[in-house]
């Protein structure tokens, strides 16, 4: 498994909710709404070139930490990132709640209905 971590420190403005996000080199998602952008192939390398908005579609728990599941609205890629310390717990719970109501990704109705806020 070849995983590369390149530390890229950059601040960005959330495309979704407009929050100013202070980059620490690892956080690539918005701590307020958890949306992200499809930029990385390996975490931090900014090599995907897709730049599609990545919607938080689920939350998993691993060793007591939250892992946010993102899906790119443009190309459909799914990515998992660990939540950062400053992430909004409310937003995490909202995503987890929504995912539970929707069922497992890729199944059942509701997938095609979710075209909104574009
Ligand atoms: Zn945001
Ligand atoms: Zn993409």
Image: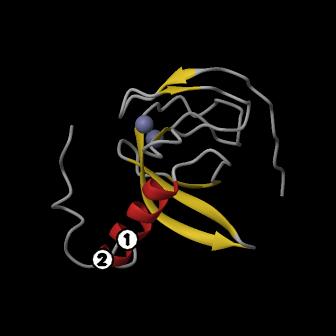
Q: Is residue 110 above or below residue 82?
A: below
Q: Secondary structure at mark 1?
A: helix
Mark 1 Cα shell of 10 Å, populated few (<14), some (14-19), many (≥20): some
Mark 2 Cα shell of 10 Å, populated few (<14), some (14-19), many (≥20): few
Q: Position of residue 7 (x, y in %)?
A: 80, 30
Residue lying at 63% horizontally and 53% vertically, measured from the top left: 83
Which quarter of the picture shows residue 108? bottom left
Residue lying at 62% horizontally and 26% vertically, measured from the top left: 22
Q: Position of residue 27 (x, y in %)?
A: 65, 38
Residue lying at 61% horizontally and 62% vertically, measured from the top left: 67
Q: Which residue is mark 2?
A: 101
Between marks 1 and 2, how big is the CA–CA gap? 6 Å
Look at the image and name its color scheme. Answer: secondary structure
Q: CB at mark 1 closer than 8 A to ligand 1?
A: no
Q: Secondary structure at mark 2?
A: helix
Q: Which residue is mark 1?
A: 97
Q: Nearer the viewer, residue 85 or 25?
A: 85
Which quarter of the picture shows residue 113? bottom left
Q: Position of residue 34 (x, y in %)?
A: 48, 46
Q: Is there CB contact under 8 Å for labels 1 and 2? A: yes
Q: Nearer the viewer, residue 22 or 36?
A: 22
Q: Is residue 86 above or below residue 92?
A: above
Q: Position of residue 3 (x, y in %)?
A: 81, 49
Q: Is residue 58 above or below residue 91?
A: below
């Amino acid at each position: 498994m070849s995983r590369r971590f390149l530390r890229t420190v950059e601040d960005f403005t959330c495309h979704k909710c407009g929050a100013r996000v202070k980059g620490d080199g690892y956080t690539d998602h918005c701590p307020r709404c958890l949306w992200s952008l499809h930029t990385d192939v390996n975490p931090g390398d900014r090599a995907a070139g897709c730049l599609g908005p990545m919607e938080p579609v689920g939350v998993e728990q691993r060793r007591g930490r939250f892992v946010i599941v993102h899906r790119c609205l443009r190309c459909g890629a799914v990515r998992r990132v660990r939540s950062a310390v400053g992430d909004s717990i409310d937003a995490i719970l909202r995503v987890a709640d929504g995912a539970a109501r929707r069922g497992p990704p890729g199944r059942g109705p509701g997938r095609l209905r979710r075209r909104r806020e574009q």
